Amino acid sequence: MAKRREKDHSDAVALRLAGYSYSQIKDKLKVSKSTLSGWLDKYPLTPQGIKEL
């Protein structure tokens, strides 16, 4: 994985753990939802994040 891609991946995980949705992360990092789906499949949205949607 290229360095930028690694940073995007780690940033995506951090944002997800902070309660961000795929759409919010996609907009911040400029990556596709399908990419996020692969990266974040082990990180479900928190109950608080679900409430905010």
Image (spheres, helix red, strand yellow):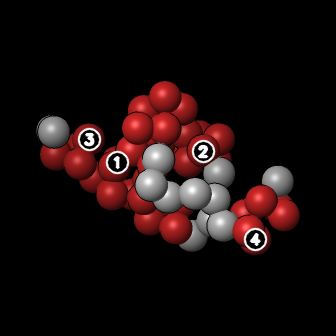
Which numbered disc, 1 or 4, marks the residue closer to the eye? 4
Calculate the distance from the C-alpha at mark 1 to the C-alpha at mark 4: 23 Å
Q: Is residue 33 left or right of residue 12?
A: right
| For residue 30, above or below residue 14 | above
Residue 5: which disc? 3
**Mark 2: which amino acid?**
Tyr
Q: Residue at x 45, y 49 (%)?
A: 40
Say which label, 2 or 3, has the lower sequence index: 3
What residue is drawn where x is 42% and y is 33%? 35
Judge the density around disc 4: few (<14), some (14-19), many (≥20) Cα neighbours within 10 Å: few
Amino acid type shown at disc 3? Arg
| Residue matched to label 4 | 48
Residue 31 seen in this snapshot:
no
> Residue drawn 44% across and 65% down?
14
Distance, label 3 to label 1, CA atoms, is: 5 Å
Farthest front residue in view: 42
- For label 4, the SS is helix
Mark closer to the observer (3, 4): 4
What label does residue 8 carry, if any?
Answer: 1
